[in-house]
Each structure stands twice: as structure tokens, then as C-alpha cells.
């Protein structure tokens, strides 16, 4: 209500103040404050500084059209802890939402999605990114409450065995399985007993699914910036990473084989590698 932040920052947390206490040393400011309050139809106010809200500051102010009483101060004192807790919860939830959004974005960028299972390998929850993925296997459609369909008998048995093993012993070693050969979908499985219980049941196993990824159109540009390479050399590195031979890369890039060899030699020197296999590994990393 028109006070500088400095006035509020000087308050001792948990104590109820009269605004007059904050400005009594400044007659000019006190007069301006009185005129401001009269315009609002207010006569008196009390303020308390809230504490315990995750590094943030907040103040609760009660303003009245008559003189404040001891009951008003008591009301602020009683309300302050509850409001501080509500604000703290809001801040924590807001931070968690940001963290979850960033994590989801990172998983999606890496072509990874998760599926949560119970002890019987029934789906409890599915990463929304899985359903949005443009190259997910059409036959595999995770449905909460059901076992994973369209994966074949062998992966079904492997999933069921893993889920039961993790339910029996949360310290069991992680496992890997192939859910689909074409398109290829690999899954890393581990115990999920430390995750919160869902409305559908207790989690036993989490699967991180590696989904097919479409090649990014700006991969060469990203690599050029990362390794400080000329664009054409970065394009050759990407072509070799994609499995092309030097001759095939030369044809795809519209270069002569001699120029392509010169590019590759410069690439090997700049990336400090001794051949195409090591170059591919570095590009992958």
C-alpha cells in the first residue's frame, strides 16, 4: 500500500507492526501516507512479515476504516503461519512443475519415453511423450491397467519376469529388452518401488524406452558450432556418422572424392581421431 520495499525489509519476522512505527521518523512521508490512506477510505493498518517460504519474502497487511485493535494483531499472528505454509507449498509445486517440464523436454529430445508397471507387468502410467512420438511402433499401445500389447511372446515373458523380480527384490540388477525389432525399441528396466503409489496400484518396475529418432535437419550446424568446424566438414562428419563411405558421402554432398578425402583428413586432425570409427564415436558422444 504505497510503502517502499525498504520499510518492509526492516520488519522482524513474526511480529505485528503498526505502519506508523515504520514511518514515524519521517514526518513528510507520514503526511503523504496519511493523505494516501484517506483517499482509500482507510484509517489504520497492521503488517506482519512471513517466514519459512523457501527463500522468498512476503508480508500480510490488514487495513481498516477504523482504528485497529489488539484482536486485529492477534488475527494477523494466527493467520501468518498458515499463509506462509500455503505460499511455501505453492513455490515448491511451481518449482517441481518447472523441473518436471525440463526433464520431460530433455527425455523427449533424446528420444526416450517411460512406462511404469506394477508387479504383474500391467501398465500403471505412460509418458505422454510416448503417444506423441511420430515413430513409435503402431502395434505397441500402452494402456493403463493392461499388459503391454503388440510386443510378442518373448518380450512379454521378459517383462513379466522382470516386474516380478523387481517386486520381490528392489535391489535386483537392471535389465534390458527389445520391445520391437522394426522400428527398433529398446527398454531399460529397473525397480520402481521407491516411486509414489499411483491410483492404479503400487509401482514395481520402470521402463525407459529408446524410441526411433528422426535425424535433425540442423545436426551439421550444431556440430559445426560445437567443434568449431567449417560447415562442409561438419556435414561430412554427419554423413560418415550416418554410415556412408567416403565415396557415398562425396556423391551425396556433390564433391569429388579427392576433396572429400581432404576434408576427412582435416576432420581427423581437428577432432584428434585416427579413423572413421573413432570419428563416428566422437560425433555420437
Image (cartoon, helix red, strand yellow):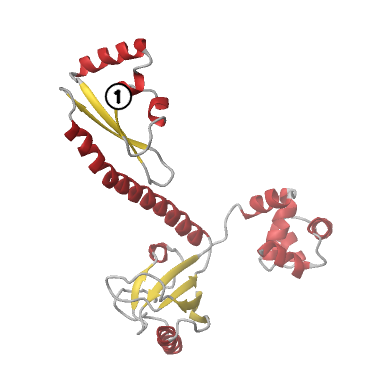
- Residue drawn at (41%, 54%) of the image: 96
Q: Quadrant of the N terminus?
A: top left
The quadrant where residue 123 appears: bottom left
The quadrant where residue 151 appears: bottom left
Along the line of sight, the residue nearer the viewer: 196 or 164: 196
| Position of residue 253 measured from the top left corner of the image (x, y, whole percent) | 71, 56
Q: Residue furthest front?
A: 70
- Residue drawn at (44%, 63%) of the image: 134
Along the line of sight, the residue nearer the viewer: 92 or 274: 92
- Total labels drawn: 1
Per the image, the residue denoted by label 1 is: 19
Residue 204 at least partly seen: yes
The quadrant where residue 45 appears: top left
- Residue drawn at (38%, 14%) of the image: 26
| Position of residue 155 measured from the top left corner of the image (x, y, whole percent) | 45, 85
Q: Is residue 17 above or below residue 129?
A: above
Amino acid at each position: 500500500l504505497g510503502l517502499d520495499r525498504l520499510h518492509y525489509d526492516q520488519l522482524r519476522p513474526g511480529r505485528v507492526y503498526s505502519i506508523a512505527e515504520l514511518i514515524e521518523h519521517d514526518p513528510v512521508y507520514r503526511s503523504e501516507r496519511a493523505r494516501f490512506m484517506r483517499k482509500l477510505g482507510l484509517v489504520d493498518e497492521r503488517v506482519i512479515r512471513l517466514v519459512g517460504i523457501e527463500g522468498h519474502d512476503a508480508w500480510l497487511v490488514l487495513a481498516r476504516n477504523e482504528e485497529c485493535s489488539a484482536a486485529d494483531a492477534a488475527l494477523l499472528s494466527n493467520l501468518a503461519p498458515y499463509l506462509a505454509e500455503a505460499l511455501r507449498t505453492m513455490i515448491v509445486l511451481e518449482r517441481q512443475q518447472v523441473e518436471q517440464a525440463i526433464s520431460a523436454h530433455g527425455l523427449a529430445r533424446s528420444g526416450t519415453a517411460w512406462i511404469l508397471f506394477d508387479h504383474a507387468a500391467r501398465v500403471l502410467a505412460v509418458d505422454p511423450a510416448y503417444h506423441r512420438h511420430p515413430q513409435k511402433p503402431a502395434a505397441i499401445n500402452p494402456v493403463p491397467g493392461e499388459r503391454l500389447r503388440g510386443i510378442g511372446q518373448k518380450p512379454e515373458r521378459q517383462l513379466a519376469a522382470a516386474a516380478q523380480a523387481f517386486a520381490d527384490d528392489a535391489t535386483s540388477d537392471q535389465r534390458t529388452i527389445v520391445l520391437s525389432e522394426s522400428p527398433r525399441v529398446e527398454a531399460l528396466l529397473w525397480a520402481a518401488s521407491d516411486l509414489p503409489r499411483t491410483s492404479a496400484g503400487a509401482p514395481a518396475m520402470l521402463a525407459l524406452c529408446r524410441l526411433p529418432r528422426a535425424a535433425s535437419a540442423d545436426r551439421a550446424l550444431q556440430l559445426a558450432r560445437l567443434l568449431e568446424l567449417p560447415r562442409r566438414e561438419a556435414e561430412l562428419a554427419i554423413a560418415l556418422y550416418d554410415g556412408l563411405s567416403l565415396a557415398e558421402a562425396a556423391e551425396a554432398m556433390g564433391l569429388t572424392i579427392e576433396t572429400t578425402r581432404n576434408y576427412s583428413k582435416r576432420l581427423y586432425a581437428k577432432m584428434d581421431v585416427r579413423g572413421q570409427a573413432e570419428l563416428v564415436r566422437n560425433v555420437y558422444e
